[in-house]
Image (tube, rainbow, N blue to C red):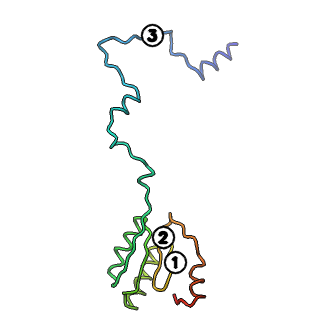
Amino acid sequence: MKLFDNMKEFFFPSDGPEQEPVHKSQDAPAIPSIEEQLAGHESGNIVNIQATAQLQVVLVKPEVFTDAKAIADHLISRKTVVLNLETASPENRRRIIDFLVGVSYAISGSLKPVANLTYIITPYNVGFIGDDLAAELENNGVII
């Protein structure tokens, strides 16, 4: 029985001799309940997590290579980018695409053609359904 008492004391230690319950004195400040604390706060301090998690899509139409840095900044901030290269020269198109392929690789994203001279670049947290879209477009005569 002593062994059982020792194990009980080990797992459930007693706080020593029994103490009498402490009664609140009228001078001691009352501790408000959780409900009272929450009711006292303004609603502006409470943030809905789902409301802050928004996916954004940015449409860009760069003309020169220096515009690629702003596009990379959108990707780094996890925004999906629709890239329209119709107004860029062929040399700038190639440079912009090469740079953004590297950026999308670095952030574990993907770059996919969706139409002639139009691409969608998605960060890692955005899925893209329709991987066969490029092949379908090529079959219909659109050169990508």
Disc 3 residue type (three-letter): Pro
| Left-right relation of 5 to 144 | right
Q: Residues within 10 Å of mark 1 (few under 14, many from 20)?
A: some
Q: State which quadrant residue 95 falls in.
A: bottom left
In the image as oriented, which residue stretches furthest toward the left?
Answer: 27
Q: Nearer the viewer, mark 3 or mark 1?
A: 1
Give the residue displayed 51% in from the left and 79% down from the top: 114
Indicate the position of residue 110 as horizontal and vertical percent values: 51, 73
Q: Earlier in the sequence, mark 1 or mark 2?
A: 1
Residue identified by numbered label 2: 122
Give me the C-alpha separation between circle 3 and circle 2: 63 Å
Give me the C-alpha separation between circle 3 and circle 1: 71 Å
Give the residue displayed 70% in from the left and 13% down from the top: 1
Give the residue displayed 56% in from the left and 19% down from the top: 13
Instruction: Determine contact: label 1, label 2, CB under 8 Å.
Output: yes
Residue 112 — which label?
1
Disc 1 residue type (three-letter): Lys
Element type where label 3 sits in the image: loop
Give me the C-alpha separation between circle 1 and circle 2: 8 Å
Q: Earlier in the sequence, mark 3 or mark 2?
A: 3
